Image (spheres, grey):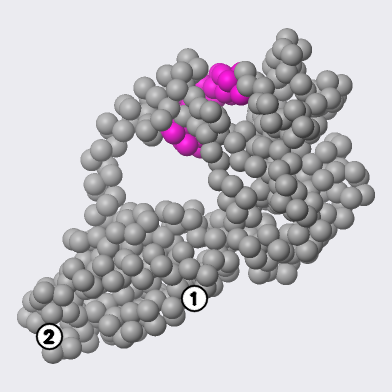
């Protein structure tokens, strides 16, 4: 199999679940090209372009469907009739591309496909969907015609192969990667190899920097470099609490000079039990608590409400501000907003991105902004990655924002 390399060339392991419902048009197109071709003697090329499940979840089904349809239309125009482009099955987020080529044209066609997908995903026409590296998978296979074979059976086999090839390659290296990851975790738990990154939070009126969210990065060039992977493995080995403590102390060793002008340092603290340790650290150091904003995940509020109330009281007494994080991810009830006095309400990135193109999510942002104004809190819109998203949030009166448009996380040196 030959991969058309762009972004993540994973195998798209969800394809075997849908090949039984493949679009009749896709099957008919493959059958016609397989049997008759275009009068050329080269192989039949089959490519699959798909959104990853994580991307679909982040965008939401409606937005993901819109992106796929728009990509299909623009990809067909970009390839100028050199390939058939269709959905794998009705309403799917997978596209099938098929073409016949001369024996010497194969490499060029694959390059053309990879380049077209890359340009379209980066271009202005699809910018509103804020596609990230790794969101799109592209795989491809060359099919040699064999007389007497059923094209529908061949097509089914090709799709299964495209779905399984990369998964098999990944499995072969899984054991070695697991050992490397465990070694990186042990290093992190000793406080070695942890690095700090920061991402700016800006005033949406003039884009001035209001503060920074501080983020942990695991040992460099390890499987645990990203925090999600680091904390997931720590949880599997009952070391999440210990890792939280090590990360928090690593962060609070720093007193950045550029916080002296009143900028805030946003620190995510979970689980709730970790708050008492944070209070102790703040009592022991000369760190300025008035610069610190503690972010609490909305889900954690339900776990220990009585304990949370006491810990927040002690933090406020030190001058620390409190933010409710991940608002809109599905855990929030109205009582979460009303149970405590929040200084900041952080709208989750999934809500921010959908709000510009879905009226119900836009209404939710407006409602949160009105509620915050009533109770003396400030709203922070997360996940702003395009100029259109920025304009929407600013025009809705949201005060603060965070996202790749204003700056990606960079290491704090």
Quadrant of the image for the N terminus?
Answer: bottom left
Prevailing SS of the magenta stretch: helix
Q: Label 2: state its secondary structure.
A: loop
Q: Label 1: state its secondary structure.
A: helix
- Please tell me whether residue 158 is drawn above or below residue 135 in the rendered image: below
Residue 180 seen by the camera: yes
Residue depicted at 32% across the width and 56% down the height:
9
Find the distance from the CA under tag 1 to the CA under tag 2.
30 Å
Residue depicted at 31% across the width and 86% down the height:
81
Q: Splitting the image into 4 quarters, where does residue 282 fall?
A: top right
Q: Are marks 1 and 2 in contact (CB under 8 Å)?
A: no
| Drawn side of residue 373 relative to residue 29, left or right | right
Residue neighbourhood size for the residue with mark 1, other residues' Cα within 10 Å, grouped as few (<14), some (14–19), many (≥20):
some
Residue neighbourhood size for the residue with mark 2, other residues' Cα within 10 Å, grouped as few (<14), some (14–19), many (≥20):
few
Relative image position of residue 100 (x, y in whole percent): 19, 80
Residue 244 belongs to the span the image colors magenta: yes
- Please tell me whether residue 320 is drawn above or below residue 69 in the rendered image: above
- Furthest residue to the top? 284
Q: Which residue is mark 2?
A: 40
Q: How many marks?
A: 2
Q: Nearer the viewer, residue 388 or 144?
A: 388
Q: Splitting the image into 4 quarters, where does residue 162 fall?
A: bottom left
Q: Which residue is mark 1?
A: 70
Residue 307 seen by the camera: no
Relative image position of residue 132 (x, y in whole percent): 48, 56
Relative image position of residue 240 (x, y in whole percent): 54, 25
Q: Which residues are magenta?
A: 224-251
């Amino acid at each position: 199999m030959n991969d058309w390399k762009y972004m993540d060339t994973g195998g798209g392991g969800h394809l075997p679940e849908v090949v039984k419902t493949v679009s009749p048009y896709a099957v008919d197109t493959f059958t016609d090209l397989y049997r008759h071709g275009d009068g050329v003697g080269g192989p039949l090329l089959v490519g699959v372009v798909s959104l990853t499940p994580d991307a679909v979840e982040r965008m939401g089904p409606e937005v993901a469907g819109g992106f796929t349809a728009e990509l299909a239309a623009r990809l067909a125009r970009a390839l100028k009739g050199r390939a058939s482009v269709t959905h794998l099955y009705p309403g799917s987020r997978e596209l099938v591309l098929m073409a016949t080529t001369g024996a010497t044209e194969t490499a060029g066609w694959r390059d053309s496909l990879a380049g077209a997908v890359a340009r379209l995903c980066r271009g202005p026409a699809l910018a509103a969907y804020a596609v990230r590296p790794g969101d799109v998978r592209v795989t491809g296979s060359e099919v040699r015609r064999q007389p007497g074979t059923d094209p529908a059976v061949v097509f089914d086999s090709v799709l299964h192969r495209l779905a399984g090839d990369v998964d098999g390659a990944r499995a072969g290296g899984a054991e070695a990667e697991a050992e490397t990851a465990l070694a990186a975790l042990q290093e992190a738990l000793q406080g070695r190899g942890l690095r700090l990154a920061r991402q700016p939070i800006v005033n949406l009126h003039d884009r001035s920097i209001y503060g920074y969210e501080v983020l942990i990065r695991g040992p460099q060039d390890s499987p645990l470099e990203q925090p999600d992977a680091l904390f997931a493995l720590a949880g599997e080995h009952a070391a999440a609490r210990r890792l939280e403590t090590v990360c928090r102390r690593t962060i609070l060793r720093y007193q950045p000079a550029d916080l002296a002008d009143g900028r805030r340092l946003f620190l995510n603290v979970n689980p709730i039990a970790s708050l008492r340790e944070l209070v102790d650290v703040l009592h022991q150091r000369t760190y300025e608590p008035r610069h610190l904003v503690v972010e609490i995940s909305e889900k954690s509020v339900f776990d220990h409400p009585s304990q949370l109330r006491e810990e927040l009281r002690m933090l406020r007494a030190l001058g620390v501000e409190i933010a409710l994080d991940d608002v809109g991810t599905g855990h929030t009830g109205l009582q979460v907003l009303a149970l405590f006095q929040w200084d900041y309400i952080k709208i989750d990135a999934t809500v921010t991105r959908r709000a510009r193109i879905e009226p119900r999510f836009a209404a939710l942002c407006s409602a949160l902004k009105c509620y915050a104004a009533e109770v003396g809190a400030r709203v922070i819109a997360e996940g702003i990655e395009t100029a259109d998203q920025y304009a929407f949030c600013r025009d809705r009166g949201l005060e603060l924002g965070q996202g790749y448009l204003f700056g990606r996380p960079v290491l704090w040196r």
